[in-house]
């Protein structure tokens, strides 16, 4: 089991990384400040030095944004999930968004090879006045062309109040039948949650139309308790999928931060 810890605090006009514990296989860049209109907002690239995710691995990320801090944590490239031989990989992510903070957790889609089994769990603790966007996604890929699929995908996203009150629990379970035509030929699957002040300005029908125009198949719905907006996304191939996730990030960023984001180069 490996666990990383990241903590952002607001100070001196910037959101700074005040704590970092990044053991193998995690690796991080220095924070970048890419948005001229929001020079306080830090963008951090979280990387892996192991060549992918392997059978039975347990990886944990604990990320906290202090009051007023603003940060995006993303990845430089997709992570490959190898054949797990019946022992799923567990990825567990915990986000704590304190009052007035903003966090975007937007990793690149995972690539599920034949036999891959991924159990992804994300828990958000949301303080009053905090806002965020989280995305997840997978791309099924068989490099041999033999028609083998991944074994399983489990995704759980939870949002709770600081006192532990559950605000949202969203679960998905998908079998490798995704790669064998059971989903109409789509090879990519993802979702997004956009929540907090500003999320009410997002129009689900408009987002669906813009994603569909990219070649994706999307559905958006309001989250319970006026929390925000949830989006499901299917795409036939990786380039279309990444464009769809990028569009979701751009729209969420503009709604929650109040500015159009600068390009994130990868």
Image: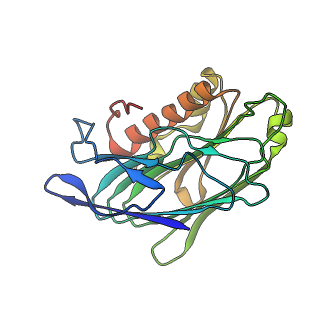
The quadrant of the image that shows the N terminus is bottom right
Query: What colouring method underlies this structural image?
Result: rainbow
Please name whichever residue, 206 or 93, is drawn nearer the observer in this view of the structure: 93
Q: Quadrant of residue 240?
A: top right
Can residue 176 be seen from the camera position used here?
Answer: yes
Q: How many marks?
A: 0
Q: Residue 237, percent across and down?
A: 67, 27
Can residue 231 be seen from the camera position used here?
Answer: no
Which residue is drawn at the image coordinates 73% and 33% (left, top)? 187
Taking the image as shown, residue 23 lies to the left or right of residue 39, namely right
Please name whichever residue, 185 or 212, is drawn nearer the observer in this view of the structure: 185
Please name whichever residue, 112 or 130, is drawn nearer the observer in this view of the structure: 112
Which residue is drawn at the image coordinates 13% and 56% (left, top)? 12
Q: Quadrant of residue 89?
A: bottom right
Which residue is drawn at the image coordinates 77% and 44% (left, top)? 150
- In this view, 98 is above or below 178: below
Which residue is drawn at the image coordinates 29% and 64% (left, top)? 67
Q: Residue 14, percent across and down?
A: 20, 52
Taking the image as shown, residue 49 lies to the left or right of residue 43, namely right
Q: Residue 164, percent across and down?
A: 52, 76
Q: Residue 83, percent across and down?
A: 73, 48
The quadrant of the image that shows the C terminus is top left
Taking the image as shown, residue 63 lies to the left or right of residue 20, namely right
Q: Quadrant of residue 129?
A: bottom left
């Amino acid at each position: 089991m490996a666990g990383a810890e990241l903590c952002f605090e607001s100070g001196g006009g910037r959101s700074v990384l005040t704590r970092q514990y990044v053991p193998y296989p995690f690796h991080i860049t220095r924070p970048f400040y890419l948005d001229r209109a929001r020079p306080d907002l830090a963008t951090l690239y979280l990387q892996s030095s192991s060549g992918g995710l392997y059978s039975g691995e347990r990886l944990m990320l604990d990320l906290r944004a202090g009051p007023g801090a603003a940060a995006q944590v993303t990845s430089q490239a997709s992570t490959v999930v190898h054949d797990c031989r019946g022992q799923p990989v567990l990825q567990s992510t915990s986000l704590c968004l304190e009052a007035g903070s903003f966090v975007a957790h937007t990793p690149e889609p995972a690539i599920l090879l034949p036999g891959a089994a991924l159990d992804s769990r994300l828990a958000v603790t949301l303080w009053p006045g905090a806002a965020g966007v989280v995305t997840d996604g997978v791309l099924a890929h068989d490099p041999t062309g033999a028609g083998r699929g991944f074994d399983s995908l489990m995704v759980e996203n939870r949002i709770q109040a600081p006192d532990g009150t559950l605000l949202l629990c969203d679960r998905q379970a998908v079998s490798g039948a995704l790669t064998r035509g059971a989903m109409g030929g789509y090879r990519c699957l993802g979702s997004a949650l956009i929540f907090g002040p500003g999320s009410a300005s997002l129009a689900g029908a408009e987002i669906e139309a813009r994603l569909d125009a990219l070649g994706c198949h999307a559905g958006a719905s309001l989250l319970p308790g006026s929390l925000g907006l949830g989006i499901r996304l299917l795409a036939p191939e990786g380039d279309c999928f990444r464009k769809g996730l990028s569009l979701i990030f751009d729209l969420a960023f503009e709604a929650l931060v109040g500015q159009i984001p600068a390009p994130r180069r990868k």
